[in-house]
Image (cartoon, helix red, strand yellow):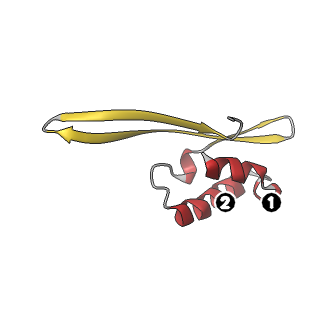
Amino acid sequence: KKAVQEISRNPEARSNPREVQAAFARRAAIDNITAVDPKDLEISKQGDQVVIGAAWSVKVPLLYNISACMDFEAKSTDP
């Protein structure tokens, strides 16, 4: 979530979706973010503000054939 919020505040990375994806890819490499790919980002505009969002699921095996599935969502406009 922090990476998405910082990219949305950076005026150099907000001009088009490709630049947003490239900025996220650089940030993901630095912060070791592997759950979300840059192509999975949802990029839109609200007025003059760029809104970046992502949703993903993580499946964690617990034991035998039992797993926990967790859903996550992050948006640059969330507090």
Amino acid carrying label 1: it is Glu
Residue 8 point in image, percent of width and height: 74, 48
Residue under numbered circle 1: 12
| Residue 21 quadrant | bottom right
| Residue 77 quadrant | top right
Could you say whether the residue bearing mark 2 is in a helix, strand or loop? helix
Quadrant for the N terminus, please. Answer: top right
Residue sitting at the far right:
48
Quadrant for the C terminus, please. Answer: top right
| Residue 76 quadrant | top right
Could you say whether the residue bearing mark 1 is in a helix, strand or loop? helix
- Asked if residue 67 lies left or right of residue 69, the reply is left
Residue 44 point in image, percent of width and height: 72, 38
Residue 23 point in image, percent of width and height: 66, 60
Vertical order, 2 against 54 (above or below): below
Vertical order, 38 against 75 (above or below): below
Residue toward you, 52 or 30? 30
> Looking at the image, do the residues carrying marks 2 and 1 touch, with CB atoms under 8 Å apart?
yes
Q: Which mark is residue 68?
A: none
Q: Which mark is residue 23?
A: 2
Numbered-mark total: 2
Residue sitting at the far left:
64
Question: How busy is the neighbourhood of tag 1: few (under 14 within 10 Å), some, or many (20 plus)?
Answer: few
